[in-house]
Image (cartoon, rainbow, N blue to C red):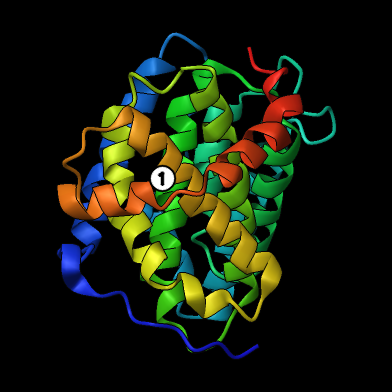
């Protein structure tokens, strides 16, 4: 499916890989500290493994690395509790979501399987306040992929479709936590999302021909505007004047519809 995409304009200062790596590392460290009191297996998928996997030199090396990745996929499936709707002693959703995000950087069948698993888990997992650091980690990773990878492609790829669907579920969860007043201590996490959200807003109209994807992108942007209007100071990456104009344009009916739509889910939060 061909799609005419606008390039990510460097009005906010480009999002260099170093920025992404620095803040994802910080986010992951915060997540690790928060979960340190719980026993969980260490992650075996590293940046070095991903690079080696994607740059395999021969079929033998490729098959060996693929086998390792497949074993990690199976382990993640267990930690996600896909067969038990995210429940059980073997389930550890924050750790599993984080590791699956790393696996999704491995090209080919591993990427597809990892994104499918992440989507399925986010679709049925319970709502727990302890999931928030991992949710922000996933949100930042997905937005980075969309802004710095997917938007640079000439055509619409299946991975891009999956990313927008996952982004929808992540921001749905964040919006529900926001309605319960649980995002007050996550202002720095929200601020780190701002460059990516701005880049996403620049390319929003590129998806107009694809209603399902366009609605996912709109949902991400609208919920982000609502959350950030309440949780963040007026001076953000857009500047106070632009922020004021953007927030004044939020459709009150849209806010009401969002609250009505997510209300049944909000009753499940812990």
Closer-to-camera residue (230/73) = 230
Say which residue appears at 44% left-offset and 39% top-offset: 226
Give the vertical position of 236 relative to 48 (above or below).
above
Which quadrant of the rendered structure holds the N terminus?
bottom right
Q: Position of residue 108 (x, y in %)?
A: 61, 71
Say which residue appears at 18% left-offset and 69% top-offset: 11
Q: Is residue 41 left or right of residue 14?
A: right
Q: Position of residue 261 (x, y in %)?
A: 72, 37
Residue 28: image quadrant is top left
Residue linked to disc 1 = 225
Query: Dot 1, crowdedness within 10 Å: few (<14), some or many (≥20)?
Result: some
Closer-to-camera residue (234/115) = 234
Is label 1 in a helix, a strand or a loop?
helix
Of all residues shown, which one is farthest toward the right?
A: 83
Say which residue appears at 38% left-offset and 82% top-offset: 6
Q: Is residue 48 left or right of residue 44?
A: left
Residue 6 seen anywhere in this rendered image of the structure: yes
Which quadrant of the rendered structure holds the C terminus?
top right
């Amino acid at each position: 499916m061909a799609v005419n995409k606008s390039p990510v304009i460097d009005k906010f200062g480009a999002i260099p890989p170093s920025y992404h790596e620095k803040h994802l590392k910080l986010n992951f460290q915060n997540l690790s500290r928060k979960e340190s009191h719980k026993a969980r297996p260490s992650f075996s998928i590293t940046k070095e493994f991903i690079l080696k996997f994607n740059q395999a030199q021969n079929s033998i090396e490729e098959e060996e690395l693929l086998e390792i990745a497949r074993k990690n996929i199976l382990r993640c499936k267990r930690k996600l509790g896909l067969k038990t709707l995210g429940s059980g002693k073997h389930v550890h959703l924050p750790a599993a979501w984080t590791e699956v995000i790393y696996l999704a950087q491995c090209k080919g069948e591993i990427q597809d399987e990892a994104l499918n698993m992440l989507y399925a888990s986010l679709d049925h997992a319970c709502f727990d306040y302890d999931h928030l650091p991992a949710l922000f980690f996933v949100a930042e990773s997905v937005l980075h992929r969309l802004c710095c990878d997917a938007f640079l492609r000439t055509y619409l790829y299946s991975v891009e479709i999956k990313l927008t669907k996952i982004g929808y579920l992540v921001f749905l969860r964040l919006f529900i936590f926001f309605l319960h007043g649980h995002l007050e201590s996550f202002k720095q996490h929200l601020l780190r999302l701002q460059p990516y959200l701005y880049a996403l807003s620049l390319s929003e109209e590129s998806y107009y021909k694809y209603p399902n994807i366009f609605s996912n992108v709109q949902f991400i942007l609208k919920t982000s505007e609502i959350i950030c209007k309440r949780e963040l100071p007026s001076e953000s990456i857009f500047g106070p004047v632009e922020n004021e104009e953007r927030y004044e344009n939020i459709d009150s009916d849209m806010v009401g519809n969002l609250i009505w739509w997510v209300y049944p889910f909000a009753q499940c939060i812990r």
